[in-house]
Image: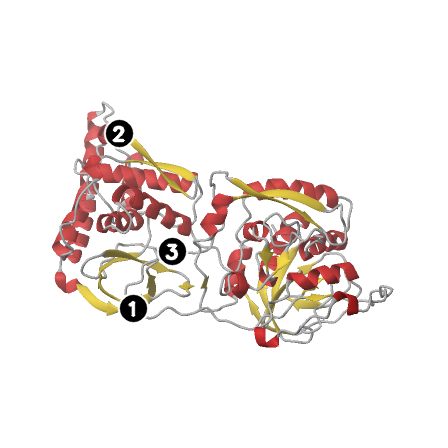
Amino acid sequence: MKTKRMIAAIIMAVVAGSVSAQGFQPTKTGNKKHDKAVAEMYDRYNTFRKKIIQDYCEFVGDPDRWKSMVAAPGVPMPQEKEIEPMLAPGAEEQTASFFSKLFRRKKKKDDAKEEKPVAEKQKPQEKPQPKPAPLTTDVLPVKEVIPAPAPIPETKPQVEARTFQSFANEYQPFTVFGTECKVRFGKDCKFKLRDLQPETIADAINNFSESQFENMLYDCLQERKNHQLSDWAYYQMLLALTNKFYGPDSNEGALVQAFLYSQSGYKMRLAHDGSHLFMLTATRHFVYNKPFFSLGGDWYFMLDGRNPEKLRICEAAFPKESSLSLQMSAVQQLAMNPVGERTITSIKNPSFSFTIKSNKNYIDFYNTYPASTVNNNFMTRWAMYANTPLEQGIRDQLYPAMKEKLQGKSQLEAVQELLWWLHGSIDLKGEYDTQSANCFLYRYDEDIWGGDRAFFGEETLFYSHCDCEDRSILLSHLVREIVGLDVVLVYYPGHLAMAVNFTDDVAGDYYMHDGRKFVVCDPTYIGCRVGETMPMCKGQETTLILLPKQV
């Protein structure tokens, strides 16, 4: 029975991958009959693996297998006119005055009007603040519902990578997003591609069957596991490794990256333009603003920043390869690099105030993240941001303190406190253009970034400025994880808000989905109450973007 289980395990593991020149050698137990049977199984295992990689190299080495292709131009991200934020009726005059300069846009020269001298201006009369009107309780129309993204299964390596201590190099460190990783690397891992002829590339790949490369692969997979790296973070880690040990944009680095990436279970294709070798990466998502190639029904992108228009591409494939996913379901373990202390205070409750520091390593990582969609539906992109868990450092700083201040409050009171906190705070010292500003400052993405860019929750807490989608994404985290209620994102043309499924009876405008009531919460309708809809959005057909339910 044990022998059958061992055979089954080996058969399951036998897929494409490197094979040590010495082969996998089983440990002897002293039981001759058992050792002989195991040795024979390992011989068959090694022979089969070697044949698979030889078949792959035979494909790569055939010049007729390399086809000239022209990249499709990158698709720009859809742009639409954003709805300006508003102040809710009854918001304090001081808040209105302060907020007006947060999202005030620069006037064009031909529209600029001469300001009257201060002495000529009449002092405005103080007016009593109007009482908030009773909440309307209207069921709002829904045009479309975007389902929550399905979990992406973990990408498994092409082979159960083994480590060979008897042939091991010394561990060498490299850094990715301020986090030290290490692999065994020595002079025997160095090589030089004399040209980019198919036969030359195939010969180099055959050399990866030696044990030092098997050790390197094993170490990379261990680092992926230890740091809980997403597909995108793992891609970046391999890029950092090959850039350090083989040089940025080197042909040797590209080939090693392709080997490590493919043997880790991912789908890639080799390509070159006559002088530079590239790794094209298949993705589950469509990535904006990057040229791409359509091969066998998959999109292949150049994700390292280079964008050649025409390439010769080899479609040689390994079995059971998986396309890269841009979803991130686990908190990645990056080293701590605290920066940018900020105190954020509620516009309505000065005691609801929290001081935090961000981890610059996560901010640097998110800066590399490409904008993308699932199934060509632009609405899906926000769910990917909202479903990426906040890193533990932010959670440790915010969640216990927030839960303590919300203790004893009803669901409505707790969500209202969080909503007002996201609305921003008053900075009477005029420091609203500094990183240390104690409020969320509203600015359009095109003014800051030159185009649309959504934030992960950590980025909204790090940068001084944000917009409606950033606030709604962060609020969705806080309500789900601190109050424990389910939420949906609510999309109106040019605007993103949120709605909450209270289990208590809560008044206000709401949406119905699957027999459940989701009450509107808009973190860009400044000073509003839970259940109030921004007037220009009310009555519009909306899209509900579902997020996973609380467990």
Q: Which comes before the other along the chain, label 2 or label 1?
A: 1
Residue 123 spot, x, y in % from top left: 82, 66
Which residue is the site of mark 1? Answer: 71
User: Residue drawn at (58%, 77%), measured in percent from left and top?
Assistant: 110
- As shown in the figure, which amino acid type bears the numbered disc 2? Gln
Which residue is the site of mark 3? Answer: 324
Asked whether 363 or 419 is in front, the reply is 363
Q: Is residue 362 left or right of residue 411?
A: left
Which residue is the site of mark 2? Answer: 165
User: Residue drawn at (48%, 71%), measured in percent from left and top?
Assistant: 78
Q: Which comes before the other along the chain, label 3 or label 1?
A: 1
The structure's colour scheme is: secondary structure
Residue 301 spot, x, y in % from top left: 34, 61
Residue 495 spot, x, y in % from top left: 60, 68
Q: Is residue 131 above or below residue 56?
A: below
Placement of the N terminus among the 4 image quadrants: top left
Q: CA distance from mark 2 to mark 3?
A: 31 Å
- Local SS, label 3: loop
Assess disc 2: are there few (<14), some (14-19) or many (≥20) residues with their C-alpha within 10 Å of its C-alpha. few
- Local SS, label 2: helix
